[in-house]
């Protein structure tokens, strides 16, 4: 006799697109190409695909099954499985909260760059001049214009995490806009999210295809693509390759945040999630590979451009020093000239020796970058050299925005769905108010990331806020489902929903392979953390124009520990709480029975 | 006397060229480098005597503009050390006294003032027509009344706010409408006791009673 039945997706396609929109995010664009480059190009596909089938798809399937069966958010779902494990859901919500806080800041940066693309000359293509117009600003001279624009004009970054500055007003406005858009997309819950995902899931592919065509037609793009796909098989012997493949699959699919459980809880009971799980996982990995082709063609273009600029500089140097006619020195015969001049006029060569650079295409291609550096510095540098740069810039940052927004939808839904399951909140606050309050809360805390030292806090959250807790959460999830809830019960639930039992492949994965893999990842992570010594971060040094490594101060390290412990400790604390209250309730019930018997 | 005059003439004839050569040094003047082929590629012109004459004329023009009309002429620009690179050194002599040089700073300021005209005369840029030691004045940044990013931001922000307001208002109106129709429905049921008032109590919800009501109605 419910007054209001649980809302649901209008059709299964919306659910699939929501999962795709959530899973396909910025990590596909900026982490996977980096890993590919680090671990032997084409050869990296082998551990990546193996991990996908052994770890990614089974865990994805499991989360969808839990959500669809329990028809509750993560807290409710895990409490229903076992009252002692409600903390697992709470840990997911806390981790999602941390993610929401810092992830939308990336969207704010994307907005900033997007709006700044509507100018005749892209602001990151040239250095600004100093007051008497004799030279460029010093910080921009030692760094590059794109780095200057990112670190100085976008972030206005301070030199260490200790120096807080004021809030960067432009960035704060962009963050406000980002949260307003998130609110607009989730204000009516699944009804509004379901319509939005048609666009956020599909349009990035349109842009990627456009960029693929533009990318491979750029001068020098094929150098990059060739470099990426040349497999270096010896990397397969390196255990770090396999660990990175496993963690990449794991984080890329967005397991453990509770978003998948939340999305699946709005499904109809008999929705065929098995095929959907396989589809979404394959789409996610396919997108990673597709995006890395695009990234590497852009890399190749940028590397070739830098290499040819280097050769041009050397040509000019030789012509000017030795008064050679212009058409005698070409970029092909520079090395010939240098050896010749070394023989005939060694003293003059020695005089300019400090300015002679060895130009190497390999060295340019070897500079592997990941993360925000790739997305905002390397890519914008490549874009500014393309013809019609403003158009490509707008397209690119719009795509980044869609990818980021799509993932944010999942993150915020992971927080809101469990909250709505608490009847107290659901009855006192309407859908719109609750969603608005969550967004407002995250916005206010997110302003901390727009201060001058905000980027350092962002990096801290990015590295420590979600990684360790997720491994712990998903490990506990798979152990719970396989052993505490019981594989037999789980199989029966799936048969109830799908009409058939999962075959032996899934069962082996859930019971044996995935838990073992997760335990080993967990152990490796801890070992790495302990062996790594004091945690460090990269601070921008404006005098040198580079990032330098600094150690976190004491309060920073305490905060890191707090981040790690706060989500993980929810599990034991809730279990303890459940044990105590049950114990009390148990005593109460036995006394009632005794009274009745009298 | 005639012999003295001849000797003096011969001496002058021999000395003048060397004097002008002695005047033309890089310390007193500026070195210029032209990268014509880099700038113009296929449309590059040949550097020859006429081009050099043109260059001297341009420099004389620059000196005239800077000095406010002093009669600088092509003969006041002395050029030496020409190379195949297309680079050479030039000095500027005063129109009043051809053995005296114009100070370097004046020459520098004159060139800075007319740099754009000199570049355009030769279809070159600040980078391809290089006066060694004279840094080009960099282009002033474009000043906008409103930064363009703020305009784009304003547009998007306006649209989003309008969207949110529209959604919230429509939800509110829908709720009011459904509440009104629900109230009308509730009023016409059975003995007038709303189910809501019964449900809240701790007692058991007796399904049977409600069902009977419906049957009775039939």
Image: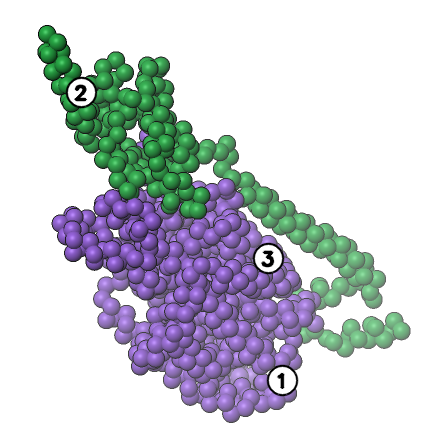
Q: Quadrant of residue A275?
A: bottom right
Disc 1 sits on a residue from what chain?
Answer: A
Q: Which mark is residue A487?
A: none
| Residue A586, x across and y down, in percent | 47, 80
| Residue B34, x across and y down, in percent | 33, 39
Which residue, given by chain and number where applicable, does mark 2 sit on?
B13
Which circle's residue, 1 or 3, is located before the other in the chain? 3
Camera-side residue of A110 and A61: A110
Residue at coordinates 62% horizontally, 84% vertically from top-left? A498
Q: Is residue A567 above or below residue A598?
A: above
Disc 3 sits on a residue from what chain?
Answer: A
Which residue, given by chain and number where applicable, does mark 3 sit on?
A185
State whether residue A109 appears in this view. Answer: no
Which residue, given by chain and number where applicable, does mark 1 sit on?
A498
Camera-side residue of A179 and A394: A394
Residue at coordinates 46% horizontally, 33% vertically from top-left? B143
The 10 Å Cα crowd at callout 2, few under 14, some 14 to 19, many 20 or more, is: few
Secondary structure found at label 1: helix
Q: Quadrant of residue A464?
A: bottom left
Q: Colour of chain A?
A: purple
Q: Colour of chain B?
A: green
Residue at coordinates 42% horizontally, 32% vertically from top-left? B120
- The mark lying in front, picked from 1 and 2, is 2
């Amino acid at each position: 006799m419910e007054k209001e039945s649980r809302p649901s997706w209008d059709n299964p396609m919306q659910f699939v697109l929501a999962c795709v929109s959530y899973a396909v995010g910025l990590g596909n664009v900026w982490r996977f190409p980096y890993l590919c480059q680090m671990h032997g190009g084409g050869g990296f596909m082998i551990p990546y695909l193996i991990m996908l089938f052994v770890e990614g798809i089974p865990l994805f399937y499991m989360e969808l099954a839990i959500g669809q069966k329990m028809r509750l958010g993560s807290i409710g779902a895990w409490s229903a499985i076992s009252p002692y494990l409600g903390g697992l859901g709470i840990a997911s919500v806390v981790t999602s909260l941390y993610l929401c806080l810092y992830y939308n800041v990336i969207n704010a940066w994307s907005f900033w760059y997007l709006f700044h693309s509507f100018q005749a000359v892209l602001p990151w293509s040239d250095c600004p001049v100093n007051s008497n117009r004799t030279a460029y600003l010093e910080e921009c001279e030692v760094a590059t214009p794109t780095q200057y624009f990112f670190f100085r004009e976008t972030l206005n970054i301070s030199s260490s995490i200790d120096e807080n500055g004021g809030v960067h007003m432009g960035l704060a406005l962009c963050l406000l806009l980002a949260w307003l858009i998130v609110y607009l997309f989730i204000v009516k819950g699944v009804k509004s999210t379901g319509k939005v995902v048609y666009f956020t899931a599909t349009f990035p592919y349109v842009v990627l295809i456009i960029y693929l065509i533009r990318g491979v037609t750029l001068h020098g793009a094929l150098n990059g693509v060739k470099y990426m796909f040349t497999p270096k098989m010896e990397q397969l012997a390196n255990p770090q390759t396999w660990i990175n493949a496993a963690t990449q699959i794991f984080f890329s699919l967005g397991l453990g945040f509770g978003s998948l459980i939340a999305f699946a809880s709005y499904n109809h009971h008999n929705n065929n999630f098995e095929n959907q799980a396989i589809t979404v996982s394959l789409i996610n990995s396919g997108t990673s590979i597709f995006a890395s082709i695009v990234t590497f063609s852009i890399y190749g273009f940028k590397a070739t451009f830098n290499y040819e600029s280097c050769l041009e500089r050397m040509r000019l140097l030789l012509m000017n020093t030795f008064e050679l006619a212009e058409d005698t020195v070409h970029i092909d015969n520079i090395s010939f000239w240098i050896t010749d001049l070394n023989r005939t006029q060694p003293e003059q060569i020695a005089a300019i020796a400090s300015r002679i650079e060895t130009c190497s295409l390999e060295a340019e291609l070897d500079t592997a970058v990941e993360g925000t550096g790739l997305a905002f510095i390397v890519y914008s540098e490549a874009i500014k050299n393309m013809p019609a740069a403003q158009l490509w810039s707008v397209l690119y940052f719009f795509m980044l925005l869609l990818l980021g927004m799509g993932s944010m939808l999942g993150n915020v839904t992971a927080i809101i769905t469990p909250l709505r399951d608490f009847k107290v909140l659901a009855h006192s606050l309407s859908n719109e108010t609750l969603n608005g309050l969550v967004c407002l809360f995250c916005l206010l805390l997110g302003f901390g990331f727009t201060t001058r030292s905000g980027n350092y806090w962002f990096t801290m959250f990015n590295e420590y806020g979600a990684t360790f807790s997720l491994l712990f959460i998903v490990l506990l999830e798979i152990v719970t489902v396989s052993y505490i809830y019981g594989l037999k019960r789980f199989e029966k639930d799936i048969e109830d929903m799908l009409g058939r039992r999962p075959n032996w492949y899934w069962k082996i994965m859930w019971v044996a392979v995935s838990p073992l893999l997760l335990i080993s990842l967990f152990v490796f992570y801890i070992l790495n953390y302990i062996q790594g010594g004091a945690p460090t971060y990269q601070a921008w040094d404006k005098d040198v124009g580079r990032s330098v490594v600094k150690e976190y101060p004491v309060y920073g390290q305490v905060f890191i520990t707090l981040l790690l412990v706060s989500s993980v400790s929810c599990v034991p604390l809730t279990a303890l709480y459940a044990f105590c209250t049950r114990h009390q309730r148990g005593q109460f019930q036995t006394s009632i029975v005794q009274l009745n018997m009298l | 006397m005639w012999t003295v005059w001849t000797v003096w003439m011969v001496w002058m004839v021999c000395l003048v060229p060397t004097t002008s050569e002695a005047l033309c040094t890089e310390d007193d003047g500026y070195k210029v480098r032209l990268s014509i082929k880099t700038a113009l590629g296929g449309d590059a012109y040949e550097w020859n005597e006429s081009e050099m004459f043109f260059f001297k004329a341009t420099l004389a023009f620059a000196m005239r503009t800077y000095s406010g009309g002093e009669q600088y002429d092509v003969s006041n620009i002395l050029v030496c050390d020409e190379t195949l690179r297309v680079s050479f050194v030039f000095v500027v002599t005063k129109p009043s006294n051809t053995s005296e040089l114009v100070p370097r700073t004046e020459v520098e300021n004159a060139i800075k003032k007319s740099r754009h005209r000199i570049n355009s005369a030769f279809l070159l840029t600040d980078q391809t027509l290089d006066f060694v030691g004279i840094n080009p004045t960099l282009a002033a940044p474009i000043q906008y009344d409103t930064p363009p990013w703020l305009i784009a931001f304003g547009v998007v922000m306006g649209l989003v706010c309008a969207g949110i307001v529209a959604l919230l208002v429509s939800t509110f109106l829908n709720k009011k409408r459904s509440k009104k129709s629900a109230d009308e429905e509730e009023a016409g049921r059975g003995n007038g006791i709303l189910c809501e008032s019964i449900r809240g109590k701790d007692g058991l919800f007796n399904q049977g009673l409600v069902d009977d009501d419906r049957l009775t109605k039939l």
